[in-house]
Image (spheres, rainbow, N blue to C red):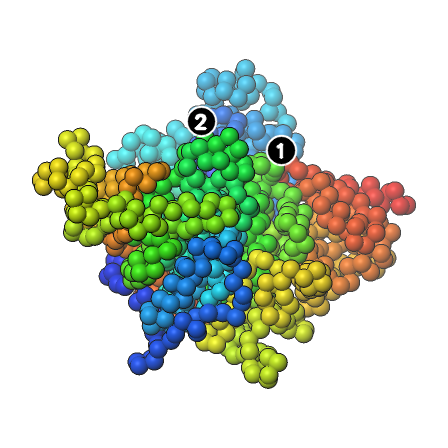
Amino acid sequence: MSSKSVERLGRVVIRFAGDSGDGMQLTGDRFTAETASLGNDLSTLPNFPAEIRAPQGTLPGVSSFQVQFADHDVLTPGDAPDVLVAMNPAALRANLGDLPRGATVIVNTDEFTKRNLGKVGYTANPLDDDSLDSWQVHAVPLTSITVEALDTFDLTRKDKERAKNMFALGLLSWMYNRPTAGTEAFLKTKFATKPEILAANVAALHAGHAYGETTESFAVSYDISPAPMAAGTYRNITGNLALAYGFVAASYRSGLPLVLGSYPITPASDVLHTLSTLKRFGVTTIQAEDEIAGVGAALGAAYGGALGLTTTSGPGLALKSETIGLAVSLELPLVIVDVQRGGPSTGLPTKTEQADLLQAMFGRNGESPVAVIAPSSPTDCFDAALEAVRIATTYRTPVILLSDGYLANGSEPWQVPDVDALPDLTVELATEPNDVDDEGNPVFHPYLHDETTLARPWAVPGTPGLEHRVGGIEKADITGNISYDPGNHDHMVRLRQRKIDTIAQSLPDLEVDDPSGEARVLVLGWGSTYGPIKAATRLVRGTGAKVAQAHLRHLNPFPANLGDVLRSYDRVVVPEMNLGQLALLLRAKYLVDVRSHTAVRGLPFATTELADVIDQHLKELA
Amino acid sequence: MSTDLGIPTLRSGTDGVPTLPEGETQNRKEFTSDQEVRWCPGCGDYAILAAVQGFLPDLGLRRENIVFVSGIGCSSRFPYYLDTYGMHSIHGRAPAIATGLATSRGDLSVWVVTGDGDALSIGGNHLIHAMRRNVNMTILLFNNKIYGLTKGQYSPTSDVGAITKSTPLGSVDHPFNPVSLALGAEASFVARTMDSDRKHLTETLRAAAEHRGTSLVEIYQNCPIFNDGAFQLLKDRDEATARILHLVDGEPVRAGSGDATRVVVRDDEGRLQVVPEADADPGRLVRHRVADPDPSQAFALSRLDDPAFAQVPMGIFRNAPRPTYDDGVRAQVSAAVDDAGGRAAHADLTALLHGKDTWTVA
């Protein structure tokens, strides 16, 4: 045991930063897993470049992973790191601006060579002058100590150097009293076929831990108690994994086989990767030749009675729009996941944004309404997937689920649900005629709509007696035959809209968090801004001010009480990572003068930024 | 990294599709829907529809297990006129939609109806990838060398020089040869037939349906409104006899009769040429090998096409079975399910959701 002193902390934000090849995402993931197993609440933010390996040691090549963990409820990955681990000068330079005065910086001095310093514009070594005096700097020759610790291993110097991320992880694990057994088990699986590499990584992990314990420069280690959480079994999960599991659960609960048609695209591809490993659950994945074929395959499968799913990001959604319009016309269930990223065009493939809301709402020809929903956190992606399937199958409609890059890659602890407690998604397929003809003979009418849901029967090929044709040409109501009749078209356009509007009857009222009941300002958000908005309202309330907060899961249709909620506050503030897309919809639909706060920096909102915005509005009303 | 997939043994194209009970039959009328056919008078599509309605009952498949998927264009109205399941989809995308359907439902006989514009222009990508993957489906490509439904623009099979609505000075656009394209995409079954030759059309469709994998059947089809007579030479009995090179497996490739018979030979450079039979060196005669795993000779035969129809190879260019995509996908899923002890149950899903790293809060 260490003889050093242990301090207790309530919360800590750590950012691991290094070159794209330094293994910072893995280091962050492992530290997160260790932290989760200790029962801290946490939230993570991976941040990496689109380039797989940008030029070594340069600013564009910096990859980072931030985790906030605490002895209480955590809503965001944290605004500013308390600790920065910088594996090279580029990582220091790229992240120093985010570091508050007094924060701890651990730098790998081995990489602070003249050449590396020059690559990022340092004319002098910041470790040698007073430029870092505002921070607590631990200058550690991480690479050379790692190599030294692995002296007896029969490995190349390069392989030994590669283990330096495990050394750093060991050091941080010591500093925050994290257990390393989980990481050792992880390494055993990862390097099962490379025993020497495995041993080296474990040795580096231990060496890092021992370094913290014995080196004088690290005088204190820290303890963060577990956060109070509801009783249950927990795991850590990212948004993309939660989405994939949500769809598998929906398949199980609906009894329909899941068929994913998808084309690889950042940041959605992990859903394809995960589902391709879950064939055991009857999941079929089709990696299509393009985005259009991905949704086409999903729609074809849906026509055949499967749970049709396609996953993409903004540019892919643009390509799928015509097929989604066909699904609107066919009135078949189809789920489209858009893991949003910075746009327009290729934009910022690895960064987050919420700027596809209007594309999801309106990005098709003609009056082509679809249901739109958005998860609010990584774990909520699981529930959102089930909800998307519920709406799609109940109402026989395409549903667009808007996740984003932050939710996709961010992670947090998840209370693993009881499978029996998941919604029952049983679907009734049509099996027999549903109408009679003029002579009273039973017939099947594919466009005879259910009176309550306005859904049409789902009659899949292989069902005798229900042979019928569907298509993108306007259909006559009831019979589904081609119809160019003006009155019928007007009727069908309104019917399809009414069907989407009808979904609102199945939605719970929007809940408002307004503890005093006296707030005059409502902060309303959607999607991944939930954490920062919630955290900001807490900050503001901490100062004694009153503010209400609500968050939309359903963007189309909106919950039935939304208009009443909006009109019951003197001011409605809508923070969005776009230029005010939800605000535009709210203003148009409810004639309420909502105030937008927008930022499109490819990063989630900072809590303090939103708290300042709320403060400003409170002041204006005072 | 690659691995042995253990793809199932090759079977007929309709294996797995439920058949009629022993002794029961269906007729053409049962395959005819109640919808009024709305093609122009004299359109070649009528003949193809009649042939398909006449031939489908012979397959002995349950009608509800047959699905026709089409794209956009005159030909794509086809599904409305058949009393099977059908989807009239969007321009060019039928092969993609059919891929999802055929892959997820091995018990269906899936057909795609498309045209030269639908398949080769806007849907070119989906077409080549369907053929590359070898999804078990039959694609009927109606080639009339013109855009009909948009009223007469040139298509990707229109000849250079074609005067159309959008090429008033003649098209400078080089056309695709659909058969060459299909062979280049390694389609496992490629054939060409003609709307007006009912017998040949029916025989070709039967072979295409029998083939497991993607069958691409190019059907020369007359558009009486915008490109009338495009295949007229081949409809004249004597001209057809003289010009059509019959592709018969194992036989020399011949056109014409009597003294005017011509045959395909391989020249010193390895190229194929059509020469009078009397002049042909028997050692250089090209015999058609329909199942040759190497598509080179079939491709060379497809290049004998000539815009003026000096000779036109007709029949089955290639029928060389190889593993199909949909069989492979289904095999992987069912093997995974079987290996795990059957259909996933409550406990399996619970285990999945928990993963390997959990902790408990009391």
Which comes sooner in the sequence, label 2 or label 1?
2
- The spot of residue A261 in percent (x, y) is 46, 54
The structure residue drawn at horizontal position 60% and vertical position 70%, both measured from the top left corner, is A479
Which circle marks residue A56 in the picture? 2
A159 with respect to A432 (left or right): left
The quadrant in which the C terminus of chain A is found is top right
Instruction: Say which quarter of the image contains residue A336.
Output: bottom right
Q: Position of residue A528 (x, y in %)?
A: 64, 49
Which residue in the structure is indicated by mark 1?
Answer: A99
Per the rendering, the mark at residue B227 is: none
Residue A398 x %, y %: 59, 59
Q: Is residue A459 above or below residue B103?
A: below
- Cα distance, mark 2 to mark 1? 23 Å
Give the amino acid at mark 2: Gln
Which type of secondary structure does the marked residue at label 1 adopt? loop
Q: Is residue B47 left or right of residue A67?
A: left
- x and y percentages locating residue B69 in the rendered image: 46, 59
Is residue A470 at least partly visible in the picture? yes
Q: Chain of mark 2?
A: A
Looking at the image, residue B142 sits to the left or right of residue A454; the answer is: left
Disc 2, SS:
loop
